[in-house]
Image (spheres, rainbow, N blue to C red):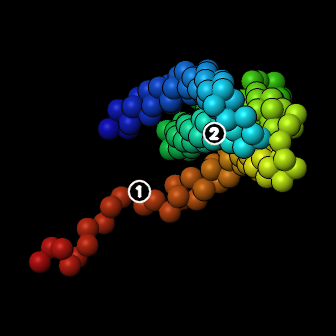
Amino acid sequence: MRDYEYRALRNTIRERGTARLVLLPLVFIGWAVAAIATAAVITVAISTVVPLLVLAAGFEAIFALHVNVERIGRYLQVFHEDGRGWEHVAMRFGERFPGAGPDPLSTRLFVLTVSVNFLPAALGGAPIEVAIVAALHLAFIYRIRTAQSFAARQRAEDIERFSELQQERPDTVTPDPRSMT
């Protein structure tokens, strides 16, 4: 059972990691299509809201995939590895060499795209519209930053939580005497 669970969860990590990489360009293609379509139909600053929603939905999907992959990895690390396995080594590498890998949430790309998305609003529109649209764009950038901060803390927190759960797990299951009657 343990071997099957380990293989199934490793496959889940691989599949969700692949899904995240496939989803990323689709999000930006969807954003570009929405930006062009709304700009062609609506000429006010508010036209940038629909493409912003496409970016936000895409980011949230990528964030959810990342968080769940990391959580599965920490589960495997605590319940299936002895300290020399891949998850332990990958975590130590990340701690020792921060910033040595790619940005798993593509935060720089999202912030850049949000900034580009705001340009049409900044170049024209009523001041109140521009202010509202600017607030929406800044709120999304804030969300990106908070997600990035959460992701940076997640590994250590999940290790701690899963370790606590492992300590609480009994080695043997004692049958409930009430169920024996």
Q: Examine the rendered structure and indicate whether residue 70 appears above or below residue 104.
A: below
Question: Which mark is nearer the camera, 2 or 1?
Answer: 2
Q: Secondary structure at mark 2?
A: helix
Q: Position of residue 178 (x, y in %)?
A: 20, 79
Q: Position of residue 48 (x, y in %)?
A: 71, 38
Given residues 112 and 108, the one toward you in this image is: 112
Which picture quadrant has residue 177? bottom left
Amino acid type at image mark 2: Val
Horizontally, residue 105 falls left or right of residue 8, namely: right
Horizontally, residue 120 falls left or right of residue 156, namely: right
Q: Secondary structure at mark 1?
A: loop
Q: Is residue 2 visible?
A: yes
Residue 171's tag is 1
- At 63% across and 39% down in the image, what residue appears? 50
The quarter of the image holding the N terminus is: top left
Residue bearing mark 2:
50
Total number of numbered discs in the rendering: 2
Q: Position of residue 113 (x, y in %)?
A: 76, 29
Given residues 42 and 55, the one toward you in this image is: 42
Q: Circle 1: is it few (<14), some (14-19), or many (20+) Cα within 10 Å? A: few
Q: Is residue 96 visible?
A: no
Amino acid type at image mark 1: Asp
